[in-house]
Image: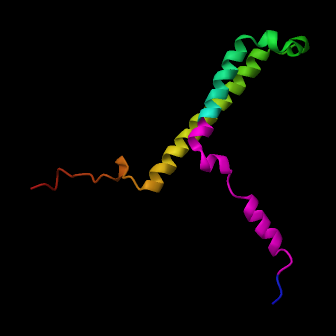
Amino acid sequence: MLQHPYQSVGQQLQRRARPGGLIKRRPLLTSLVLLGGATMLCITSLFADHLFPLLTLVGTSPLYLCLSLACVLGVAGVLVGIIGILERVDRQHIPALSDCKEQSYANRN
């Protein structure tokens, strides 16, 4: 039986297209590392002028660079944490609050 010449390439793409293993295996650790990095960048921004003098010579403030990166890392850490919680709830089939049946008071006897 002849195989399609691009079949092995398609299989390689499928292997590469899978999501990152670290987020799947350790969602709590990933979110803590991102939030920790955001905290460290906030602390670094206090001393940014002394730590990055070349950026000051160029004319850009390293304070804004550190704070913007901290904001991005913080938002990513929060999103990874929320996604991890939602995936855990989905895997364990815990009934969410939205699955509760609403009682109609108009149909009560």
Picture coordinates of residue 71 (x, y %)?
A: 65, 26
Seen from the viewer's position, the closer of residues 104 and 58 is 58
The quadrant in which residue 50 appears is top right
The residue at 52%/41% (across/down) is 82
Q: Main secondary structure of the magenta part?
A: helix
The residue stretch that appears in magenta: 4-31
* Residue 18 among magenta residues: yes
Seen from the viewer's position, the closer of residues 22 and 12 is 22
The residue at 73%/64% (across/down) is 14
Residue 15 as seen in the image, left or right of residue 78: right
The quadrant in which residue 51 appears is top right
Picture coordinates of residue 34 (x, y %)?
A: 64, 33
On screen, 54 above or below 33? above
Picture coordinates of residue 106 (x, y %)?
A: 17, 52
The residue at 60%/37% (across/down) is 31
On screen, 80 above or below 1? above
